[in-house]
Amino acid sequence: MKITVSEEIRKACPDFAGMAVSASVRNTAYSEALWKNIDEFTRLYREKYTVDSIKDMPAIRATREAYKKCGKDPSRYRPSGEALCRRILRGLPLYQIDTLVDLINVVSIRYGYSIGGFDAQKIQGDSLELGIGKAGEPYEGIGRGDLNIEGMPVYRDAIGGIGTPTSDHERTKLGLETTELLAIINGYSGKEGLEEAAAYMVEQLKEYASATEIQIITFGGGGQSMDIEKILTQGVVFKGERKTNPAKEDKVKTKAKKKTYITGLHGSGAAKMKAEIRKKRANRHKNK
């Protein structure tokens, strides 16, 4: 899947960077293990943040600014990342939809990004473009009916809009029949934080949705599709630039850097095991 950014978005939101996760998955109606983690995460989140403090989160603040620059009121048409954060901080439970949607919602809350989740097999054509909604442009938001997307960032496939930060379209929504996922993380605050959010999403998809054939697509500042296994096991740096034949010392430093963010508080057992392998390899390099 090729994803591009229109000139109108580039002008309105020059710092925008996007990262998409593509994967073959198995969706389920409910995951008890996932929801056990969600409940604990929600408790800790409420201890750390308030409805007022999340306004200062870079991803949320930048998305609100992007709405204003594109011509939309973010308080009237609230971006989903902010809406989800506000919901749990008001003491309301997170919606339980299905495993894929629940998982994406948790990633969105943790990092503040508005994330689009699509059934890739329902997307028309082999490319998407991020533009700005037009007056009278038809759009059926999930559970919302007709949604006025004029002045709102919107991803379009060959026949029309499929996703905005406020709501995705009914036509391409995820369901229990979904086997091919495309999840788009929207970084209106820039590239910083996107890799960490994508790595966390991949871990969750592997653990709770049996994800395989996983790839990362970067766009908005120049980039290329990458095999996520390279990111998790070889420490490849991907910021829209290719690195050729790095020195051995650089490789060791890169692996150490990747180990640091993959084994954070959210690191899975599998990620930690791979980090230990990388550590041993790095030590072998140092001892030569």
Image (cartoon, rainbow, N blue to C red):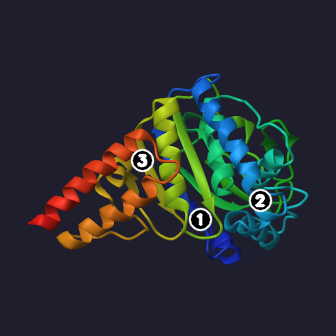
Residue labelled with disc 3? 215
Which of the pair 139/201 is nearer the observer? 201
Residue labelled with disc 1? 5
CA separation in Å, label 1 and label 3: 19 Å
Q: Residue furthest left?
A: 288
Mark carried by residue 68: none
Residue 143 visible in the displayed image? yes
The residue at the point 86 percent across, 52 percent down is 148
The residue at the point 68 percent across, 62 percent down is 131
The residue at the point 59 percent across, 70 percent down is 190
Q: Is residue 272 above or below residue 113?
A: above
Which of the pair 146/98 is nearer the observer? 98
Q: Quadrant of the C terminus?
A: bottom left
CA separation in Å, label 3 and label 2: 28 Å
Which of the pair 55/187 is nearer the observer? 55
Residue labelled with disc 2? 133
* Amino acid type at image mark 3: Gln
Helix, strand or loop for disc 3: strand
Q: Is residue 101 left or right of residue 56?
A: left
| Mark earlier in primary sequence (1, 3) | 1
User: How far from the left and from the top, in percent, is residue 91?
Assistant: 85, 43
User: How far from the left and from the top, in percent, is residue 140?
Assistant: 80, 41
Q: Residues within 10 Å of mark 3 (few under 14, many from 20)?
A: many
* Amino acid type at image mark 2: Gly
| Mark earlier in primary sequence (1, 2) | 1
Helix, strand or loop for disc 1: strand
* Amino acid type at image mark 1: Val
CA separation in Å, label 1 and label 2: 13 Å
